[in-house]
């Protein structure tokens, strides 16, 4: 069975393909469907954005579509940057510009108030309109300087709870075990039968 992953983010695509490798689903990247233009993420929650991406891709390809929307929620910023994580420092900001802005905004915030979490919402949508959704959260804290060069996004400044390294210092498998996306996908694997058959 084939499914399309509704993302053009290379980092996420790599992670999701690895996480779904043992699953018997042939995962096609969205790049194979150039006719599907950019899908604007204009929802007011991770769920709305994931749902919109999955529904449009399923309707346009006639295949099962998997979409996720994710981001970083910082306690002291009342959940910001949240759904705006990818464009925190501006519409076309790089990962580094985004995390540098976060470090600058938080430069006077003491260690005990630097709690944060990554959140990921996934939606699997069937062309006939049936869907399921799952969510994963990874708690941690924002470091004062960036460390590591793996992963993507805010990984260099996010230290997961119980860890002494940042997410950018972890290998992919270690990250998948504890990450918001890993957790959301684990739940999805448990429940995807409801929608495949
Ligand atoms: P999305 O592509 O709209 O889901 O935006 C997600 C944004 O949130 C990314 O561009 C990153 O800035 C951030 N983000 C989501 N997941 C991760 C992660 O696992 N590590 C680091 N940053 C992440």
Image: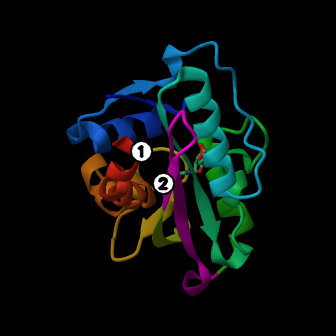
Q: Dot 1: few (<14), some (14–19), or many (≥20) neighbours within 10 Å?
A: few
Query: Can you give x and y, in whole percent of width and height, for residue 134 in the image?
Result: 47, 60
Query: Can you give x and y, in whole percent of width and height, for residue 109 in the image?
Result: 67, 79
Q: Nearer the viewer, residue 65 or 68?
A: 65
Please give the label number shown on residue 149: 1
Residue 55: quarter of image: top right
User: What span is in magenta?
Assistant: 110-134
Instruction: Answer whether residue 44 is visible to the viewer in this image.
Output: yes
Residue at the image point whose x is 34% and y is 63% from the top: 178
Query: Can you give x and y, in whole percent of width and height, for residue 95 in the image?
Result: 60, 43
Instruction: Label 2: state its secondary structure.
Output: helix
Instruction: Label 1: state its secondary structure.
Output: loop
Is residue 189 toward the left or the right of residue 85 in the image?
A: left
Q: Image height check: is 25 above or below 174? A: above
Residue at the image point whose x is 36% and y is 42% from the top: 196
Asked if labels 2 and 1 touch by Cβ distance under 8 angstroms, the answer is yes
Q: Dot 2: few (<14), some (14–19), or many (≥20) neighbours within 10 Å?
A: many
Q: Is mark 1 within 8 Å of ligand 1?
A: no
Q: Nearer the viewer, residue 133 or 9?
A: 133
Query: Magenta part mainly helix, strand or loop?
Result: strand
Q: Badge 2 is on which residue?
A: 156
Q: Is residue 91 on the magenta stretch?
A: no
Please give the label number shown on residue 5: none
Residue at the image point whose x is 64% and y is 56% from the top: 46
Q: Image height check: is 27 above or below 49? A: above
Quarter that holds the C terminus: top left
Is residue 12 toward the left or the right of residue 113 in the image?
A: left
If you read the primary sequence from the N terminus, does the residue marked by circle 1 or circle 2 appear first?
A: 1
Residue lying furthest bottom in this view? 112
Residue lying furthest left in this view? 22
């Amino acid at each position: 069975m084939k499914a399309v992953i509704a993302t053009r983010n290379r980092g996420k695509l790599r992670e999701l393909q690895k996480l779904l490798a043992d699953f018997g689903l042939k995962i096609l990247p969205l790049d194979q469907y150039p006719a599907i233009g950019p899908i604007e993420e204009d929802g007011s929650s991770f769920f709305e954005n994931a749902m919109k991406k999955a529904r449009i891709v399923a309707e346009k390809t006639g295949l099962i579509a998997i979409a996720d929307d994710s981001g970083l929620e910082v306690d002291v910023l009342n959940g910001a940057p949240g759904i705006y994580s990818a464009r925190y420092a501006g519409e076309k900001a790089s990962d580094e510009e985004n995390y540098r802005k976060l470090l600058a905004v938080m430069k006077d915030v003491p260690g005990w108030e630097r709690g944060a979490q990554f959140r990921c919402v996934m939606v699997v949508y069937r062309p006939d309109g049936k869907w399921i959704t799952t969510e994963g959260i990874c708690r941690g804290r924002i470091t004062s300087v960036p460390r590591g060069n793996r992963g993507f996004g805010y990984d260099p400044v996010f230290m997961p709870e119980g860890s002494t390294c940042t997410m950018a210092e972890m290998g992919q498998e270690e990250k998948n075990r504890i990450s918001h996306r890993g957790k959301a996908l684990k739940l999805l694997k448990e429940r995807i039968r409801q929608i495949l058959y």
